[in-house]
Amino acid sequence: MTPLSKIHDVLVIGSGAAGLSLALRLADQTRVTVLSKVSINEGSTLYAQGGISAVLDEQDSIESHIQDTLVAGAGLCDPEAVRLVVSQGKDCINWLQEHGVPFTEETWEDGSSHLHLTREGGHSHRRVVHAADATGMAIETSLESHARRHPNIELLESHNVVDLITARKLGNKEQRVLGAYVLDTRAHQVKTMRASIVVLATGGASKAYLYTSNPDVSTGDGMALAWRAGARVANMEFIQFHPTCLYHPHARSYLISEALRGEGGKLLLPDGSAFMGKFDPRGELAPRDIVARAIDHEIKRLGIDCVYLDISHKGAEFITSHFPTIHARCLEFGIDMTREPIPVVPAAHYTCGGVLTDSSARTDVPGLYAVGEVACTGLHGANRMASNSLLECLVYARQAALDIRRILPDTPLPPALPEWDESKVNDSDEEVVVAHNWDEIRRFMWDYVGIVRTNKRLERAMRRVELLKQEIADYYGHFRVTSDLLELRNLVTVAELIIRSAQQRKESRGLHFTLDYPDTDDSQTPQNTILEP
């Protein structure tokens, strides 16, 4: 057993917008430890380009933002969750400005300065606040800077969580989180960390797919950790494929922001003809699921590698001022977006489902919270509307902070916990197995559980998952854990959750499209797909 040493008041797993904003909201009254499995700033927040949706324009309204979100969510949004998030948009923007986030401004005719608002797919108004085309980077670096300076926040990099420790796992009837086993990848040592409260802020699971806009860390860790700890997950079949990732052999995981389409960019076939009008009257500003399926359809129909996104008609000055990061990145690959269209393909981008939480970000396991993309709050329903994700991170971090402050004084301290036992395992001499299994999962998920699905494809994927689960479990039981092995173990878990959820939905709705049930079935009351551990 561990000696009765340090107890972490709040252990936050993940260091993106959700994790860091939660830590900062708690730190004035509580000591918070934030874990990152690599560097603190490496995660999806850093790479978010578009912005944060918030009602700031006098011509806009909270009700309009709510309605747009409900429409995008295809009947599965929780209206109360939508109202909760949307109503806090302005306050969250103000909070970020107080923490130094340099949002892009514009000067009006009267000489006054205002936040520049752009428009993205599914939005009926300009309501996306941004920092040029690198909003996530501006948010992440600003919050990280404040967190590093705060005396009550401890930041631990290169710490990858192996598993959560719960009272039930130790043989008690009570189901409460007590801490976590954590691999310090620099010291090659598993630590036992006791904690009164644990918060999952680990992001999504898009690395389960071969092509993704996400960084390598997005391996569904929090979803797998919560599942093994006894929490329910919901709506895992709704994987959002971003319509436009840069198509280039050396441009790994580079997203071309939806804001390009919001500012007039057109999707074109290789012959230069536009095609989105055939699929939706909103054209390029249709929700992401419609645009991604349209591109996928044209690529398969014509047997082409990609389509093209053209904004060159807006002129070089406009493009370089609005999209400096994307312009510079494209130039690195020999593409001048001021003169020519950008080759693009869809890629896995966002996990709309996740660990089921309530309005305070609480999971089924007492003391365990989930905020950000790891959670299923009811905001996104069957399809996330553009730029609602960062807003969700900020709002539910605030909700969780309020609840944690309320319950922490009465939360029992965790007892001494068993040390991690490595006495019966060895160092692996077959790391190639991990790499091979990782690649196999991502390929069959892309082929069989991608933008367009069928029952037969899902059955094939499930058979492969069952085989890999056993192989990975055997490997995990015989060798010392590594970060790659932990991610692989989590990846096969979330792959299974996605497939099981997709098999349960006997209709096409939002991001889930199946050729066996191509229509939305409104004869039944739309229901969330909830999986019980």
Image (cartoon, helix red, strand yellow):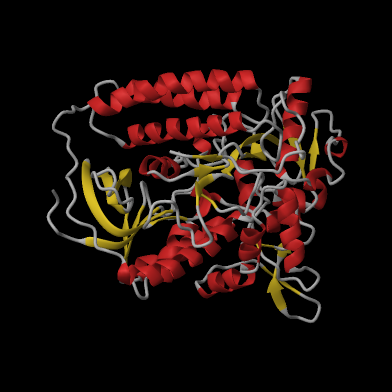
Q: Does residue 134 appear to the left or right of 492 in the view shown? A: right
Of the 4 image quadrants, the one containing the C terminus is top left
Q: Residue at x 13, y 48 (%)?
A: 1
Q: Residue at x 53, y 38 (%)?
A: 206
Give above or below for 306 relative to 317.
above
Q: Which quadrant of the figure has residue 244?
A: top right
Viewer-closest of 498 and 139? 498
Q: Does residue 509 appear to the left or right of 217 in the view shown? A: right
Q: Does residue 364 appear to the left or right of 485 in the view shown? A: right
Looking at the image, the residue that sits furthest to the front is: 173
Viewer-closest of 293 and 521? 521
Q: Does residue 170 appear to the left or right of 209 in the view shown? A: left
Q: Which quadrant of the figure has residue 481?
A: top left
Give above or below for 110 relative to 280.
below
**Image coords of residue 422 (percent x, y):** 17, 34
Give above or below for 162 relative to 425.
below
Note whether residue 340 is visible: no
**Image coords of residue 403 (percent x, y):** 44, 67
Viewer-closest of 107 and 365? 365
What is the total number of numbered labels drawn onto the structure image?
0
Viewer-closest of 406 and 127? 406
Note whether residue 220 is visible: yes
**Image coords of residue 281 (percent x, y):** 87, 44
